[in-house]
C-alpha cells in the first residue's frame, strides 16, 4: 500500500520510521498505518501500509483523524528514547530525518521524560573507527541499522540486546566498531534516521551547497555516488537509492576514500627533471616546475623528432582504466592518427585481456553476458578466481545475500575467501590449475548428463571435438594437478549442471595465468554446454578490476583492435577508419605492454607516454620495468601524484582526478554511466583528455579542446558497440551497450544468436606454467590479489584514512609452514624469487594451503612486484601474477 500511495499520490503522504526503500518491509513501528475499507462508508481496518497488499476495490484512508492521533501516540513511544533537547531542532536544513518526521507528524510531546533523563548520556560516543561513529543516546530503536547490516551487506555486525527499557544496539559481541567485523560500508550510517550512527563527515546532516551525482572511481562495479559539496569542497559521499547497480549502497572506498583529491601531495605543475637542462649530466632525479606551454611544446617537439628519426612505431602509449571513455578514446586516436602507430595498450593487459580474448573466441563478444541485476534471478553461482566481497564489494554483497537465502554456491579458488567459506563446494585448487579443474568439471557435466543438447545443437558448433577431448582426459592426473578430490569436482558439476539458472563470475584468478585465456574459453564453453547463456540469471560475467577497464577496451585501447573492437589488421577497417579520420591508419601490428617494455629495454622503443598508470608498482618484475623505463629516450607521465613510475619520467604532467572531470565510465556489465564534475579542477592540473588534446594541437592536428559531449558523439559515430549512445540519454541510469533500440540497452547478450553466429566450443589441455620449474629452489607458490580497504597501487587509498584500518601488505602463510620455518604471526620474513626479494610481515592463517602464500601489492614499501615474474598468458601476454615461485626465510 505504501508504494502504491507513494506512486499515485505523493512520497510524503504516509510518514514512515522503520521503513527504508532499500530494506524489506518490516512493519514494526506502525507509523505508516492507514485505514482500509471495502467502501467509502464501510468498516475501516487499521493496517501498516508498508507490508500490506493493495486489495482490489478497497478504499485507503491515509490522514483520518483517528490515524493522525494514533501516529502521534506511536511517535511518542519513539520520542521516549530521544534526547529532549534534540526534539526542538525541527525541520531546518540540518535536521535529521527523525527531526523532520517530528515536524511532519506535528507532535513533539515526550510522555516519558523521566526515562530519557535517567538514561541520557548513558552511552559513550564510539569514535574507535576511522569513518563510522556512534552516539547511541540518540537511538530510537527503529532497527534500520541492524536490518541494513543484515539485508544489504550481509555482515551481521549490529544487533539488539536486552529487553524493554534496557534494549540497546550492540556491535559484534558488544564492543566498539573497530573491534567488530564491520567492513565500513556505511549502510547503517546512511539509513539511521537520527545521528545515533554517523560518519566522520556528518554527511547526513551537513548543509551541502550542492549534491553532484557521479560514478565511483574505484572498481568495475560502477556504483553511483552522491558527492556533497560545501564551500567548493567535498564534505561527504552517500549513495542514491535509485542507483542502477548499488541502490543506496557503497563499499568503504566509494563512500569514504575520497580525501586523496585534496592531498598536499597532488601534483600541481608540470615537472621536468633538472637533468634535462644538460643532456650530458644524467645524475640525480630533481624535477623543476615548468609552465604548461613549455611542457607541452617540449613533448610535441620530442615526439616529432623521435618519429622523424626512428619512425612512428618507436613511440608507444599506455592509457588508463582510471580515466574516462572519452579520454581513452582520445589517447588511442592520438597514437593511431597523430603518431601513426598501433602501439597503444592499457592496464587490461595486466588483468582482463584474456577475458576479452577468450570470450571473443567463443562468443564473438568479450564482455559480460548478463547484468548485476541477474544475481537476483540466478539459482546457482559459480565464482572462479575472484574474491568479490573484497575486490567488488557491492557485487560480492549481492551474491552473499542470495547465498544466505540458500542459493547454492561453488567457489574455485586457492584461498578460503569469504565466499569460499560460505560455499556448498569450495574447490581449493593449487594456484595455476584452473584449466585442469575446468576440464574435470566439464568431464562430469558431460558424463553425468548435464549438457543441454538442444542448445548445443541449435546455437553452437564444434561440440563433438570438444566432448571427445574432454572425455579423453586422465581424471586422476587432473585431480592430482588441482590438488582436489575428483568426487568434490563431480559434486560441484552436479550442482551447476542441475541448476535451472547458473551464473558464473570470474576474476583475475582466472586471467592472470599462463593459460588465462584458455581457462576463459573453457569456462565459456561450460556455460554453453549447459545452456547457461542468453537468458536471465546465467552467463559468464567477468568482474572487471578497475572502474573503466571495460570502457578502455571498448574505446580501442588495444594494439590489435580499435574503437568498438574493430580489427585493425582488416583491410575494410583500415579503409573505414582512414576515411573517418581523414588520415591513413597504421598498418603494422602494435605492441602489447610487455612487448613495449621489452622493446624499450632493447632500444627499439624510444618514447613512451603513460596516462595514469604506476607500472613500477603494478606490473611484474620491477627490476626489468625500471631498466626498460630508464632505457627510454623520452618518458611522459600523466599522474595525480609523483608515483614510482612518475619518478622515472622526463616530463610529469599533473592530471585532474575523477571528481574534477566530466565524461563517462563503463562498468563490468557494459553500462555506460556519467561522470560529472563535482569540484573545480585543481589549480595547475588539467583533465587527462585536455592534456592529450593540447599535445595533438601542438603537433599540428586540428583537435578541439576536451569536451565530453562532443567526444561521445565521435565515439558513437565510429564505434559499432556504442552506436546511438549520446551523453544526454545517459541520465541517472546509464545505458548498457549495445543498444537494442533507440532507448534501451542490452541487459543480456546472446539471447538469439552470438556475434559469431554460432558459439564455438574450444578445448585446451592443461599445461604447467614455466614458473613451476623454479619450485625446487623456490618451493612456495605465491599468489597475489587485493583487499577491501585498498585499491591497486594504493596511490589514492593510501592518502585517505583507510590507512588507519590497513597499514601494510601482509604475507598469508599456512600455520604448518610457519611452524616449520619457526616464524611467528606478524614477524618479518625475507621473501625471495628468481627476480628479487623483499621483506614482509606474516599473517598466519589456514586460508591458504601448505606450500601456498598470498599477499597484496598496495604498498610501495613492500613493492611485491620486485619478485613477481614475466611468464605471460600464452595468448595475450597478461602476466601470471597468481603463480610466483618463492622462498620464505626467517630473518
Ligand atoms: Fe566503488 Fe566498487 Fe565500492 Fe562500488 S563496489 S563503491 S564501484 S569501489
Image (cartoon, rainbow, N blue to C red):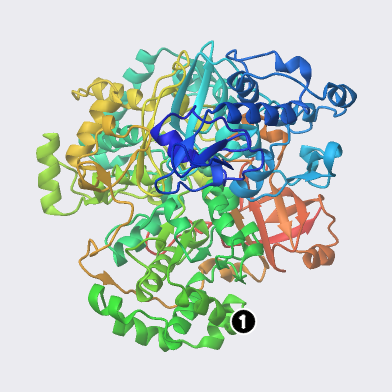
Q: Residue 539, image x and y in percent?
A: 39, 63
Give the secondary structure at mark 1.
loop
Q: Which residue is more in the foreground, 879 or 372?
A: 372
Residue depicted at 61% across the width and 40% down the height: 790
Q: Quadrant of residue 212?
A: top left
Q: Which residue is mark 1?
A: 485
- In the picture provided, is 751 more to the left or to the right than 283? left
Q: Say few, some or many: other residues with alpha carbon within 10 Å of mark 1 (under 14 / 14 to 19 / 20 or more).
A: some
- In the picture provided, is 856 more to the left or to the right than 595? right
Q: Which residue is more in the foreground, 639 or 637?
A: 639
- In the picture provided, is 322 more to the left or to the right than 254? left
Q: Is residue 311 visible?
A: no
Q: Is residue 457 visible?
A: yes
Residue depicted at 67% across the width and 49% down the height: 155
Q: Quadrant of residue 534?
A: bottom left
Residue depicted at 69% across the width and 31% down the height: 74
Q: Residue 753, image x and y in percent?
A: 23, 65
Above-or-below relation of 803 to 380: above
- In the picture provided, is 345 more to the left or to the right than 21? left
Amino acid at each position: 500500500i505504501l508504494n502504491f500511495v507513494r506512486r499515485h499520490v505523493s512520497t510524503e503522504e504516509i510518514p514512515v520510521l522503520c521503513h527504508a526503500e532499500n530494506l524489506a518491509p518490516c512493519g514494526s513501528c506502525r507509523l505508516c498505518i492507514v485505514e482500509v475499507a471495502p467502501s467509502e462508508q464501510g468498516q475501516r481496518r487499521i493496517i501498516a501500509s508498508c507490508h500490506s497488499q493493495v486489495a482490489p476495490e478497497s478504499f485507503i484512508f491515509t490522514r483520518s483523524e483517528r490515524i493522525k492521533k494514533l501516529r502521534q501516540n506511536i511517535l511518542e513511544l519513539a520520542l521516549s528514547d530521544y534526547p529532549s533537547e534534540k526534539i526542538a531542532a525541527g525541520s531546518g536544513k540540518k535536521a535529521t530525518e527523525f527531526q523532520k518526521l517530528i515536524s511532519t507528524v506535528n507532535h513533539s510531546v515526550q510522555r516519558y521524560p523521566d526515562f530519557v533523563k535517567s538514561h541520557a548520556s548513558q552511552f559513550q560516543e564510539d569514535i574507535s573507527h576511522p569513518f563510522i561513529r556512534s552516539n547511541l543516546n540518540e537511538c530510537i530503536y527503529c532497527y534500520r541499522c541492524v536490518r541494513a547490516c543484515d539485508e544489504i551487506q550481509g555482515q551481521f555486525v549490529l544487533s539488539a540486546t536486552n529487553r524493554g527499557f534496557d534494549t540497546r544496539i550492540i556491535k559484534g559481541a558488544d564492543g566498539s566498531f573497530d573491534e567488530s567485523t564491520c567492513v565500513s560500508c556505511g549502510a547503517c550510517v546512511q539509513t539511521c534516521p537520527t545521528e545515533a550512527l554517523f560518519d566522520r563527515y556528518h554527511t547526513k546532516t551537513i548543509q551541502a551547497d550542492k549534491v553532484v551525482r557521479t560514478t565511483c572511481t574505484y572498481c568495475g562495479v560502477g556504483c553511483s555516488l552522491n558527492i556533497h559539496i560545501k564551500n567548493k569542497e567535498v564534505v561527504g559521499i552517500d549513495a542514491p537509492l535509485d542507483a542502477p547497480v548499488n541502490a543506496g549502497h557503497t563499499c568503504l572506498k566509494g563512500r569514504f576514500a575520497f580525501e586523496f583529491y585534496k592531498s598536499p601531495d597532488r601534483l600541481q605543475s608540470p615537472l621536468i627533471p633538472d637533468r634535462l637542462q644538460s643532456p650530458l649530466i644524467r645524475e640525480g632525479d630533481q624535477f623543476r616546475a615548468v609552465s604548461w606551454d613549455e611542457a607541452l611544446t617540449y613533448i610535441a617537439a620530442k615526439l616529432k623528432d623521435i618519429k622523424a628519426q626512428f619512425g612512428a612505431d618507436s613511440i608507444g602509449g599506455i592509457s588508463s582504466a582510471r580515466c574516462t571513455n572519452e579520454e581513452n578514446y582520445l589517447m588511442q586516436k592520438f597514437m593511431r592518427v597523430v603518431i601513426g602507430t598501433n602501439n597503444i595498450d592499457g592496464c587490461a593487459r595486466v588483468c582482463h585481456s584474456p577475458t576479452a580474448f577468450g570470450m571473443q573466441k567463443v562468443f564473438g563478444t568479450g564482455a559480460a553476458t548478463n547484468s548485476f541485476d541477474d544475481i537476483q534471478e540466478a539459482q546457482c553461482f559459480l565464482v572462479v578466481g575472484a574474491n568479490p566481497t573484497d575486490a567488488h564489494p557491492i557485487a560480492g554483497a549481492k551474491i552473499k545475500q542470495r547465498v544466505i537465502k540458500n542459493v547454492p554456491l561453488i567457489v574455485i579458488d586457492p584461498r578460503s575467501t569469504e565466499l569460499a567459506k560460505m560455499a556448498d563446494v569450495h574447490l581449493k585448487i593449487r594456484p595455476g590449475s584452473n584449466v585442469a579443474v575446468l576440464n574435470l568439471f566439464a568431464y562430469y557435466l558431460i558424463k553425468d548428463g548435464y549438457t543441454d543438447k538442444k542448445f548445443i545443437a541449435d546455437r553452437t558448433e564444434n561440440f563433438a571435438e570438444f566432448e571427445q577431448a574432454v572425455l579423453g582426459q586422465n581424471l586422476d592426473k587432473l585431480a592430482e594437478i588441482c590438488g582436489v578430490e575428483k568426487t568434490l569436482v563431480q559434486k560441484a558439476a552436479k550442482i551447476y549442471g542441475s541448476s535451472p539458472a547458473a551464473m558464473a563470475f570470474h576474476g583475475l584468478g582466472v586471467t592472470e595465468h599462463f593459460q588465462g585465456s584458455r581457462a576463459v574459453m573453457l569456462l565459456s564453453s561450460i556455460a554453453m554446454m549447459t545452456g547457461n547463456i542468453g537468458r536471465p540469471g546465467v552467463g559468464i560475467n567477468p568482474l572487471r578490476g578497475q572502474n573503466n577497464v571495460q570502457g578502455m577496451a571498448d574505446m580501442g585501447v588495444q594494439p590489435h583492435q580499435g574503437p568498438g573492437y574493430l580489427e585493425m589488421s582488416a583491410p575494410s577497417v583500415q579503409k573505414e577508419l582512414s576515411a573517418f579520420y581523414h588520415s591513413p591508419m597504421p598498418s603494422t601490428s602494435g605492441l602489447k605492454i610487455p612487448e613495449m617494455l621489452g622493446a624499450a629495454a632493447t632500444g627499439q622503443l624510444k618514447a613512451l607516454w603513460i596516462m595514469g598508470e604506476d607500472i613500477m608498482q603494478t606490473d611484474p618484475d620491477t627490476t626489468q620495468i625500471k631498466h626498460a623505463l630508464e632505457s627510454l629516450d623520452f618518458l611522459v607521465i600523466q599522474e595525480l601524484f609523483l608515483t614510482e613510475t612518475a619518478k622515472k619520467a622526463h616530463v610529469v604532467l599533473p592530471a585532474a582526478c575523477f571528481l574534477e572531470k566530466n565524461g563517462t565510465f563503463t562498468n563490468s556489465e557494459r553500462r555506460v554511466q556519467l561522470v560529472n564534475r563535482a569540484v573545480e579542477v585543481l589549480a595547475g592540473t588539467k583533465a587527462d583528455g585536455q592534456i592529450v588534446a593540447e599535445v595533438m594541437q601542438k603537433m599540428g592536428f586540428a583537435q578541439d579542446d576536451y569536451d565530453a559531449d562532443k567526444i561521445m558523439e565521435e565515439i558513437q559515430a565510429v564505434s559499432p558497440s556504442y552506436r546511438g549512445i549520446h551523453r544526454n540519454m545517459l541520465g541517472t541510469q546509464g545505458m548498457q551497450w549495445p543498444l537494442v533500440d533507440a532507448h534501451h540497452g542490452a541487459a543480456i547478450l546472446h539471447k538469439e544468436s552470438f556475434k559469431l553466429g554460432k558459439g564455438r566450443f574450444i578445448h585446451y589441455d592443461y599445461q604447467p606454467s614455466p614458473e613451476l620449474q623454479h619450485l625446487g629452489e623456490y618451493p612456495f607458490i605465491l599468489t597475489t590479489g587485493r583487499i577491501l580497504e585498498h585499491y591497486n597501487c594504493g596511490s589514492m587509498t593510501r592518502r585517505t584514512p583507510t590507512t588507519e584500518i590497513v597499514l601494510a601488505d601482509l604475507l598469508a602463510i599456512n600455520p604448518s609452514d610457519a611452524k616449520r620455518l619457526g616464524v611467528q604471526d606478524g614477524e618479518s620474513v625475507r621473501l625471495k624469487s628468481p627476480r628479487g626479494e623483499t621483506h614482509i610481515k606474516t599473517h598466519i592463517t589456514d586460508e591458504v594451503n601448505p606450500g601456498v602464500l598470498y599477499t597484496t601489492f598496495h604498498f610501495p614499501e613492500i613493492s611485491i612486484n620486485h619478485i613477481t615474474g614475466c611468464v605471460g598468458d600464452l595468448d595475450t601476454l597478461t602476466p601470471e601474477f597468481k603463480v610466483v615461485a618463492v622462498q620464505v626465510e626467517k630473518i
